[in-house]
Image (cartoon, rainbow, N blue to C red):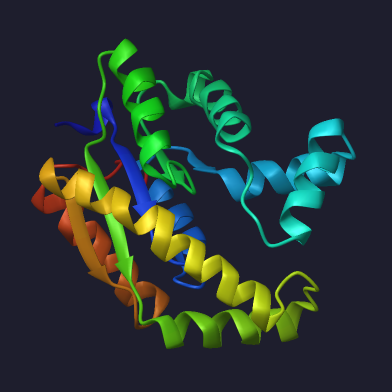
């Protein structure tokens, strides 16, 4: 694969694993857009739209946005011009059903994921990071109970998608503990081992 062809990536990890930060870094390195469902939903909330109101109520309860709503938002984003030659998805797919939806969408374009980056972080580390972030940012939605609920949902619903992608041979397990630069370097090295080339501008 050449740089011109881009890369179609998915980054997966529990809340507090740093996948949002690493996703942006990796996307920049490969010259592709980072597409985060969390960012898209936060933008909807900030806009005060009907979607934003729906999402606010769901998130405040510590729950996840329904599949059909998430899939519609992601498909619309992937259909935009800047994602035509590659993208990095963060937060989607998050369960087995959404894997099928993404397969269907990409298959219709003659595409598939090139690699799935799994950031491996111990549960205790995730909880500690999220608790510190909540204190620093004054995030009311990051109570200890809601953090535990989110991690339980991840372990129950999202972690199983990795088994699907492992069967396809596209998962790279990355140690998610270390400095930002160390973790980014590990991810890039794993992707380059697959023949995925960084953007010349990176």
Number of marks present in the image shown: 0
Is residue 41 found left or right of 115 in the rendered image? right
In the rendered image of this protein, does residue 174 appear above or below residue 108? Answer: below
The reply to whether residue 169 is visible in this rendering is no
| Residue positioned 9% across, 52% down in the render | 193
In the rendered image of this protein, does residue 84 appear above or below residue 128? Answer: above
The reply to whether residue 193 is visible in this rendering is yes
In the rendered image of this protein, does residue 60 appear above or below residue 7? Answer: below
The answer to which of 190 and 71 lies nearer the viewer is: 71
Q: Measured from the top left, where is residue 36 in percent x and y?
A: 54, 46
| Residue positioned 33% across, 66% down in the render | 119
* Quadrant of the snapshot with the N terminus: top left
Q: Measured from the top left, where is residue 104 in percent x and y?
A: 34, 19
Question: To which quarter of the image does residue 54 belong?
Answer: top right
The answer to which of 180 and 152 lies nearer the viewer is: 152
| Residue positioned 31% across, 76% down in the render | 182
Is residue 88 found left or right of 41 in the rendered image? left
The answer to which of 147 and 189 lies nearer the viewer is: 147
Is residue 127 found left or right of 57 in the rendered image? left
Q: Measured from the top left, where is residue 26 in percent x and y?
A: 37, 53
């Amino acid at each position: 694969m050449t740089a011109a062809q881009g890369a179609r990536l998915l980054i997966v990890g529990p809340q507090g694993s740093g996948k949002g930060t690493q996703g942006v870094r990796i996307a920049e390195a490969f010259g592709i857009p980072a597409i985060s469902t969390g960012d898209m939903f936060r933008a909807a909330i900030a806009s005060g739209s009907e979607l934003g109101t729906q999402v606010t109520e769901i998130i405040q309860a510590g729950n996840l946005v329904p599949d059909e709503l998430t899939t519609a938002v992601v498909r619309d984003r992937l259909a935009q011009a800047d994602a035509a030659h590659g993208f990095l998805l963060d937060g989607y797919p998050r369960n087995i059903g959404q894997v099928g939806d993404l397969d269907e969408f990409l298959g219709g374009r003659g595409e598939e994921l090139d690699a799935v980056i799994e950031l491996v972080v111990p549960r205790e580390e995730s909880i500690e990071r999220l608790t510190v972030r909540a204190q620093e940012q004054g995030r009311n939605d990051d109570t200890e109970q809601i953090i535990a609920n989110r991690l339980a949902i991840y372990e129950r619903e999202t972690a199983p998608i990795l088994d699907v992608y492992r069967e396809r041979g596209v998962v790279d397990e990355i140690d998610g503990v270390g400095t930002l630069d160390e973790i980014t370097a590990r991810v890039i090295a794993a992707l380059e081992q697959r023949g995925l080339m960084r953007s010349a501008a990176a």
